[in-house]
Amino acid sequence: MKQTNILFTCAGRRNYLINYFKDALAGNGKILAADNQLTAPALVDADVAIQVPSIYDEGYIPTLKKLVREHKIDAIISLNDLELPILAKHREELESEGAKIIVSDTGVIDIAFDKYKTFNFFKNLGVGTPKTYLTVEEAMEAIRNDEIRYPVIIKPRWGSASIAVDIAENETELKLAYQLQHIKLKKSILKNASASDIERSILIQEKINGEEYGIDILNDFEGNHYGSFVRKKMAMRSGETDKAISVINEEFSKTAQLIAENTRHIGNMDCDFFVKDGQVYYLEMNPRFGGGYPFSHEAGINTPAIYLAWLQGEKNVDMFNKFEANKMFSKYDKMMPIKI
């Protein structure tokens, strides 16, 4: 394997990805991690830790270009939803410096990031998805017509990491939660992401009570579907999977392939879906590594090794796919010493 240097941006708390990629490199390159805080835990495990400006700072992209040149970066991988539209917009500019930007095109990012467009994408594709509304009036009309029932979900249209998700059990709670979310949104990190339609930036969504699953849908760097890797969620904490068991299901895989072939996204895409009475309901698409990826990895799919192979022009990556069903894992907390 030739020397390969990977830069993770918005590295945050994703130490597991840093270490999975270091294992896959086996010393043939470096893992660099960037964040706007040098105290971000993932920076501890990287070979090189770098502080960068906010993703919304006008100096952010010039900083990334400089890093690519100085550190001979071969690929950039973002770990944050809010950064994906920015990297997609500037992909050609960044790639002119010599690094592969592993991000989907702006159209895919737009559909995935805008939860209302995601709803319409699934609906038009014939994939089950919870009924979703942009206004309280639309939602209340649907409730009166018995199209949906309480409880309902209220959440940001351009959301990330389950930030500001509420559940309303009745009309009073629905109106209050909707108003409060608008107020809180304008003060949160989602303000910039929601600026294009701030008055229609909150969704009301049918709540599906069923078994919850996560899935990693993997495409190659040309957008061709490679495979999908499912986990049934056994426990959740702070919006992320805390305990899960791997699943192999032909019908789930067919639906995932349909989504993959119609998005032609690049690399890994993390999705959530529910199963109720035999019906699958997809909630969202996150075209990046998600918090549930470790469950897929530990069950046998080595996506970091696959990424490295694709970066070097190799097509046959099946040796890195040993995914098995009925492998259960659970996350745990770990203390990281931070240099100050």
Image: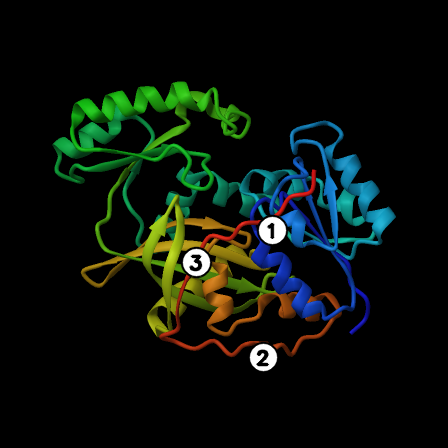
User: What quarter of the picture does the N terminus occupy?
Assistant: bottom right
**Residue identifier under label 1:** 104
For marks 1 and 2, give the one nearer the viewer: 2
Taking the spot 87% from the left edge, 47% from the top edge, the residue there is 70
Q: Is residue 163 left or right of residue 167?
A: right
In the image, residue 281 above or below residue 114: below
**How far is disc 1 from disc 3 in space, using C-alphas?**
29 Å
Image quadrant in which you'd find residue 328: bottom left
Crowding at label 3, few (<14), some or many (≥20) Cα neighbours within 10 Å? Answer: few
Foreground residue among 4 and 112: 4
Crowding at label 2, few (<14), some or many (≥20) Cα neighbours within 10 Å? Answer: few
| Dot label at residue 318 | 2
**How far is disc 3 from disc 2 in space, using C-alphas?**
27 Å
Q: What amino acid does circle 3 point to?
A: Lys
| Dot label at residue 331 | 3
Q: Is residue 75 left or right of residue 300?
A: right
Q: Where in the figure is residue 272, as x and y percent of width and height? A: 38, 54
